[in-house]
Amino acid sequence: MQATIRKSNKVRRSKGDVIFDTVVYIITGLMILIAIYPMYFILIASISDPALVSSGEIVLVPNGFNLRAYEKLAEFDDIWTGYRNTILYVIGGTAITLAVNIPASFALSRKQLFGKRALMAMYLIPMFFTGGLIPTYMVVKAVNLVDNPLVMILPFSVASYYIIVGRTFFQNTIPEELWEAAQLDGCGQVRYFFIVALPLSKAVLAVIALWSAVGQWNGYFNALIYLRSPEFQPIQIALRNILINNQMMGMTQIGAAAVEARQLAELIKYASIVVSSLPIMLLYPFVQKYFNNGIMLGSVKG
């Protein structure tokens, strides 16, 4: 009897539904393949024979397994210095970003804030118009942050987008009744922020922290412009310098040595991409849910 009920309750799918689902699965599979294959190819190319990679024989599986590129990278002290600096920049930059953007978000979410519209405009304008590279460099130089590791943490810690996302979260997620109840207990704005609002804001804190950390890890432009000393360079700049040096070595040699040097330089390029991307890629599966939540944090909810 139960089997008969289950069978009768089963929705019959038409031929058109089956065809539509099949087409959707095929398109989705192709999109996943297009997104994943470049990184997969870089990985297998970095551990294959450089001659086979150069001749285009590496397509789906590695061939001539070797770790020459990674061994060569490990010989450069700049790699380890760059990793150390990047980790410090990520930790320090994320902490400062949260410390300056979250309180600003909370303040802009309060109805009692005087001049709220003017302050909001001051944050919105830089999202569309900036002073440009030269004025920014002059300001950074005026405060003695050129070739100073703090330039990777302090000057660019304020992000208007983070502030807007945080403000929307505080306005739409934390009930105003909590503030009214806190007032009855003699709680002020500062105490309310630390005791009530922050513990309820773990989602937005996690999202902004992750965005900031990923941006700090992948960032290279500020280091390229403002840092000169090798001991302050992040991993991205260290890898860039290594790639340039290896390519120049290939150009200065002749004959078979030049061919081998160019092949090794190409292999090191693939290995560098893996070395710089692998930590974030390994971290992403554990924080994916926060990225998904972050997509909705800045939206307007009814």
Image (cartoon, grey):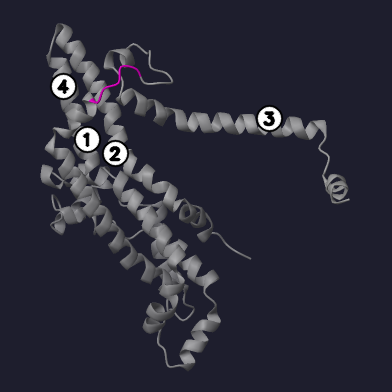
Task: Compute the Cα span from label 3 to label 1.
Answer: 42 Å
Q: Classify 111 as above or below 227.
A: below
Q: Quadrant of residue 234?
A: top left
Task: Compute the Cα span from label 2 to label 4.
Answer: 21 Å
Q: Circle 3 sits on which residue?
A: 23
* Mark 4 crowd level (few <14, some 14–19, many ≥20, 10 Å Cα): some
Name which residue lies at 82% across and 45% down. Answer: 10
Q: Amino acid at mark 4?
A: Met
Q: Is residue 22 left or right of residue 208?
A: right
User: Which callout, 4 or 1, points to the residue nearer the camera?
Assistant: 1
Q: Which residues are magenta?
A: 63-67
Name which residue lies at 37% across and 83% down. Answer: 191
Name which residue lies at 37% across and 58% down. Answer: 209
Q: Circle 2 sits on which residue?
A: 276
Q: Amino acid at mark 2?
A: Ser
Q: Which numbered disc flags the more N-terminal residue, 3 or 4?
A: 3
Helix, strand or loop status at disc 2: helix
* Mark 3 crowd level (few <14, some 14–19, many ≥20, 10 Å Cα): few
Q: Circle 1 sits on which residue?
A: 239
Task: Compute the Cα span from label 4 to label 1.
Answer: 14 Å
Q: Amino acid at mark 1?
A: Leu
In the foreground, 273 or 229 = 273
Q: Quadrant of residue 78?
A: top left
Q: Amino acid at mark 3?
A: Val
User: Badges 1 and 2: C-beta atoms under 8 Å apart?
Assistant: yes
Q: Which numbered disc flags the more N-terminal residue, 3 or 1?
A: 3
Q: Circle 4 sits on which residue?
A: 248
